[in-house]
Image (cartoon, helix red, strand yellow):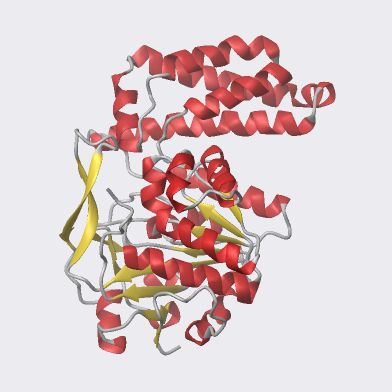
C-alpha cells in the first residue's frame, strides 16, 4: 500500500475517519492491536494514540485498553475514569510515573467517554511499573488468609524483607533490591517458589474448601510477585553491567501471558495495547546484533488476531531518560539528539516516499529490506516487515506536558 498522510489528532466529536481508512486492512480480524511509541513521554505520540484508539473504538468495536502498569495500578485509574473527579485529580489515583506516561491519553479518554457515553475498560497488563512488590504482597496476604492460612507467616516474611523495595520507578526499586543482602534476596525467591508449588499442589482441595476464583487470584498474585523479583534482579544486573543477554524478557513474557489470559477468559473483549515499540514488536529486540529481549509481541505473534503498529519520528531530538539521583523517579527526562536517520531505515523510507511535513502511516509490506528504526535515542536492528504490521511516523518528538 502507498504511504498515506494521517492527522495526528482527531476531535472527539469527529466521525470522519478517512485518514485511517487503510488501517481496516490490518485490524479487521484483530482482537489485540498494539499502538506503540518509539520513545516514552512524547506529546505527538500521545496525541496520535488518541486518534488511533478513537478509530478502533468507533469503527472496530474495541472496548479495552491495556497499559504498561500492574493490575492494582489499573484498578485505581479505572476508579478515576469512572468517577466524577476531573483531570486535576488524576494524580491522586496515579503514581508519578504512570501520570507522566499516560496522563495526556487518560485525560483525553475520560473526556471522550463522557461526551460519547461509550464504555472502555482499563487493564493493567504489566508488572507494577515501579517494580515495587508491596501492594501485590499485601493483596496476596489477604488471599492467603482465606485460602491457606498456615502460609500467612511466609507471606509476612516476604513483606518484611521487601518492605524497603518501594521506589517510584524501576530505577529506584532495582537499586533498593541491590541494597538487600544476598541471603535476603535468595530467601524471598525460595519463599515465593515454595508458595507457588504448594498452591499448585493443593489446588484441587483448596478450590473445594474455598472459592475457586480466590484460589486462582492467589496463584496469579504469587506469579506476579515471582516475576517482579526476577525482573528486579535482571534490571539491577543490567544497571551494573552484568545482565545476561535476554534477561529482561521475563517481564515481556509476563505481559504476553496476561494479555492472552484476559482475551481467552473474555471472548467479547477487543483490546488496544498502549506500550513501547520494543514490547509490541514481533521480532527479537536488538540494538547492535545482541539479544536485548524477546518482546511481548513475539509471544503474541503466533496469534492470528494480533496486530502491531510501531511509532517513530523524523525529528533531530527526542525525550530521553537520564539517571538523576535527586529525582524521586531516579531519572529525569531530558532532550537528547535522536539517532541519525540511516540508510535502510524506516525513517529514510518515509522521507523518500511521504516527505517530512506531515504524519505518515506506512504498511510494512512495503518495507522489505528495511532493517533500522529509531528507539529512544538509538535505533533497533530488525526486519521491519516482520516486526510490525504498520509504522506511524510524526515529523517531531517533543516532550509531553505531563512530564516533570
Q: Where is residue 163 shown, x and y percent of the image?
A: 42, 19
Q: What residue appears at the point 34 percent right and 24 percent down from the top-left corner?
A: 177
Q: From the image, which quarter does the N terminus lie in?
A: bottom left
Relative to 266, is 329 on the left or the right? left
Q: What residue appears at the point 26 percent right and 66 percent down from the top-left corner?
A: 397
Q: Where is residue 228 shown, x and y percent of the image?
A: 46, 33
Relative to 130, is 318 on the left or the right? left
Q: Give the image quarter of residue 42.
A: bottom left
From this view, report whether residue 72 is shown above or below residue 352: above
Front residue of 194/60: it is 60
Q: Where is residue 332 shown, x and y percent of the image?
A: 22, 45
Residue 257, visible in the rendered structure: no
Front residue of 170/239: it is 170
Q: What residue appears at the point 64 percent right and 13 percent down from the top-left corner?
A: 151
Q: Where is residue 35 shown, x and y percent of the image?
A: 47, 64
Q: Give the image quarter of residue 302.
A: bottom right
Q: What residue appears at the point 54 percent right and 24 percent down from the top-left corner?
A: 137
Q: How many labels sit on residues? A: 0
From this view, report whether residue 95 is shown above or below residue 138: below
Front residue of 327/341: it is 327
Q: Residue furthest right?
A: 208
Q: Give the image quarter of residue 183.
A: top left
From this view, report whether residue 210 is shown above or below residue 76: above
Residue 22, visible in the rendered structure: yes
Relative to 363, is 77 on the left or the right? right
Amino acid at each position: 500500500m502507498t504511504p498515506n498522510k494521517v492527522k495526528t489528532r482527531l476531535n472527539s466529536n469527529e466521525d470522519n475517519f478517512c485518514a485511517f481508512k487503510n488501517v481496516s486492512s490490518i485490524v479487521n480480524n484483530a482482537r489485540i492491536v498494539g499502538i506503540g511509541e518509539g520513545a516514552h513521554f512524547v506529546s505527538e505520540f500521545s496525541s496520535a494514540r488518541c486518534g488511533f484508539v478513537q478509530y478502533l473504538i468507533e469503527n472496530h468495536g474495541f472496548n479495552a485498553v491495556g497499559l504498561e502498569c500492574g493490575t492494582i495500578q489499573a484498578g485505581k485509574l479505572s476508579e478515576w475514569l469512572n468517577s466524577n473527579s476531573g483531570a486535576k485529580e488524576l494524580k491522586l489515583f496515579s503514581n508519578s510515573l504512570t501520570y507522566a506516561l499516560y496522563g495526556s491519553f487518560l485525560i483525553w479518554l475520560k473526556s471522550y467517554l463522557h461526551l460519547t457515553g461509550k464504555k472502555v475498560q482499563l487493564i493493567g497488563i504489566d508488572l507494577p511499573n515501579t517494580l515495587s512488590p508491596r501492594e501485590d504482597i499485601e493483596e496476596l496476604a489477604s488471599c492467603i488468609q482465606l485460602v491457606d492460612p498456615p502460609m500467612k507467616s511466609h507471606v509476612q516474611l516476604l513483606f518484611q524483607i521487601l518492605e524497603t523495595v518501594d521506589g517510584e520507578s524501576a530505577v529506584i526499586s532495582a537499586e533498593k533490591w541491590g541494597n538487600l543482602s544476598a541471603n535476603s534476596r535468595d530467601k524471598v525467591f525460595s519463599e515465593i517458589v515454595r508458595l507457588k508449588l504448594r498452591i499448585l499442589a493443593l489446588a484441587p482441595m483448596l478450590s473445594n474448601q474455598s472459592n475457586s476464583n480466590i484460589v486462582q487470584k492467589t496463584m496469579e498474585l504469587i506469579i506476579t510477585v515471582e516475576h517482579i523479583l526476577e525482573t528486579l534482579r535482571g534490571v539491577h544486573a543490567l544497571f551494573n553491567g552484568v545482565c545476561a543477554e535476554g534477561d529482561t524478557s521475563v517481564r515481556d513474557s509476563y505481559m504476553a501471558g496476561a494479555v492472552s489470559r484476559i482475551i481467552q477468559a473474555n471472548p467479547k473483549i477487543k483490546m488496544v495495547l498502549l506500550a513501547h515499540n520494543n514490547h509490541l514488536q514481533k521480532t527479537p529486540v536488538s540494538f547492535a546484533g545482541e539479544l536485548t529481549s524477546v518482546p511481548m509481541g513475539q509471544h503474541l505473534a503466533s496469534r492470528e488476531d494480533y496486530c502491531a503498529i510501531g511509532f517513530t519520528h523524523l525529528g533531530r531530538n527526542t525525550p530521553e531518560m537520564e539517571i538523576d539521583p535527586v529525582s524521586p523517579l531516579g531519572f529525569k527526562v531530558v532532550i537528547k539528539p535522536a539517532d541519525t536517520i540511516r540508510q535502510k531505515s524506516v525513517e529514510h523510507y518515509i522521507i523518500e516516499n511521504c516527505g517530512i511535513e506531515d504524519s505518515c502511516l506506512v504498511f510494512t509490506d512495503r518495507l522489505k529490506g528495511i532493517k533500522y528504526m529509531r528507539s529512544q535515542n538509538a535505533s533497533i536492528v530488525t526486519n521491519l516487515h516482520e516486526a510490525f504490521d504498520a509504522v506511524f511516523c510524526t515529523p517531531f518528538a517533543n516532550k509531553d506536558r505531563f512530564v516533570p
